[in-house]
Each structure stands twice: as structure tokens, then as C-alpha cells.
Amino acid sequence: MTGRRLVLLGPPGSGKGTQGELLAASLGIPTVSTGALFRDQMARGTALGVEAQTYIAQGHLVPDRVTNAMVKSRLAAADAAPGFILDGYPRNVPQVAVLDEILSAQGWSLSAALSLELPEELIVDRLLKRALIEGRADDTEPIIRQRLAVYQCETAPIIDLYAARGLLVSVGAVGAVAEIAARIHSALGVDE
Ligand code: ADP
């Protein structure tokens, strides 16, 4: 089933990337991950990547000016026309407004905002384990704690905002990957 436009919400380490990919495969639409887009730009050493790197390395948000332009251009690509899953965007209230503009300019609307819920004490553990596997430079304990603080302060408020719009779907993100995927598919009414 296509035609879905979804936003994935949840703290760092809640499994947005993993679950986003599984859901995207079921729906036949792409995921648009701002973190992955930034890491690609950094790996290629582009001007955008060089600018983003200083913020990402410190666990701060990349400035909205840079992030919004990158997302706008990615969502204009042909493969996003049938639908998409946004992972890591929007991440603050101003980005919600920019997404609203991008959507309405195309006559699109959001299908749902899926929130992956995970107790804070599990987050640091998960990210430190991921650091061993993926070797991401921003997965050190002090930077993880900084990213969590940014999440609580800047990103968590947008959950209420989407709830007020009647778009919020919350799913518990504790358990095995397949188990959580099953919960998500059923909460959204998508066949696996
Ligand atoms: P995680 O969800 O584990 O924190 P991401 O891969 O989503 O990891 O993001 C990594 C980093 O990229 C963030 O800490 C932030 O610096 C930057 N970033 C990602 N998305 C955004 C965004 N929407 N706005 C600003 N910065 C972002």
C-alpha cells in the first residue's frame, strides 16, 4: 500500500532507523533519514557535510536553515511522490511548521506520526552497544547524554503537537526487532 506519509518520532536509540526500513519495505516507499543524509554528506566531504559535522559531533542539532533545505530537496525527488517515512525530521517545533509548508505546497498531508516509546534507562545502553557495531563518532556516553537532553527539550514537545492534531500513534519500542515491527504494522494497519 502506498500513499502514506509518515513521521517517525522517538528518542535516539529507539529504533527509528531499523523500524523505518522494515515499514518502508512493507509499504514500498523510501525512508528519508536526516541522520543518514548528513552522514552521507560528511563521508563525501561536501560543504553541507563539513558544516553539519561540527554540530553532530557535539550532539547539537544542525541549524534549521541547513536541515530544512536538505529535506525539502530530498522530498522533491520523484521516489518520494508516492509516499515516504521521515526518520529524524521534524526534530523541533519550527521544523514541524516547515514540514507543514512542504506538504501543503504539494497538496499532501501526513498520514500519521508514529512515536516509538522507550524508557530512558535503556537508551544509553542501546546506543553504547550500537557504537561497538557501527562505530558512530557521536555514540560516546557524554554525546549520547547531550543528544538526549536536546531530545527532551526540543523534540519531545512535538509529540504533543501531533497528538493534538489526532495524528499520533504510539508503540512500545522494548522487545525484539520483529516483535516491535509487528506492533507497528498492526498499529498502522499495514500488512507485513
Ligand atoms: P539519533 O536518532 O540516534 O540521535 P540521527 O542519525 O537521527 O541519530 O541524528 C544524528 C545527528 O544528526 C543528530 O544528533 C543531529 O546532530 C543531526 N540531525 C539529524 N536530524 C536532524 C534534524 N532534523 N535537525 C537538526 N539536526 C539533525
Image (cartoon, helix red, strand yellow):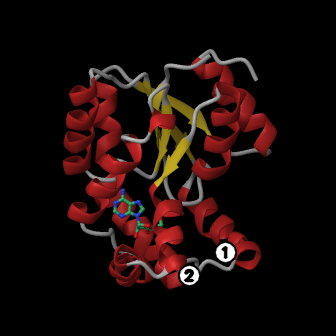
The C terminus lies in quadrant = top right
Estimate the x, y position of residue 175 in percent, counting from the top left.
Answer: 75, 44
Q: Is mark 2 within 8 Å of ligand 1?
A: no
What residue is shown at x 21% (from left), y 29% (from top)?
Answer: 105
Q: Nearer the viewer, residue 100 or 59?
A: 100
Vertical comparison of 4 with 156: above or below: above
Q: Identify the secondary structure beneath mark 2.
A: helix
Q: Position of residue 157 (x, y in %)?
A: 29, 46
Which residue is labeled 2 in the image? 141
Q: Secondary structure at mark 1?
A: helix
For the point 51% across and 31% down, the residue is: 170
Residue 133, position as x, y percentages in the image:
76, 73
Q: Quadrant of the N terminus?
A: top right
Residue 73 pos. (x, y %): 34, 49
Q: Nearer the viewer, residue 168 or 51?
A: 51
Q: Is residue 134 left or right of residue 98?
A: right
- Say what amino acid the circle numbered 1 marks: Leu
Q: Residues within 10 Å of mark 2 (few under 14, many from 20)?
A: some
Question: What's the amino acid at mark 2?
Answer: Glu
Residue 101 image-quadrant placement = top left
Distance from the alpha carbon under mark 1 to that under mark 2: 7 Å
126 shown above or below 55 = above
Of residues 57 and 120, which is closer to you in this image?
Answer: 57
At horizontal 49% and vertical 23% (from top left) the residue drawn is 4
Q: Is residue 44 left or right of residue 22?
A: left
- Identify the image quadrant of residue 123: bottom right
Give above or below for 175 relative to 126. above
- Confirm or deny contact between disc 1 and disc 2 (CB under 8 A): yes
Q: Earlier in the sequence, mark 1 or mark 2?
A: 1
Res 56 label: none
Which residue lies under the disc numbered 1?
Answer: 128
Q: Is residue 47 above or below residue 187?
A: below
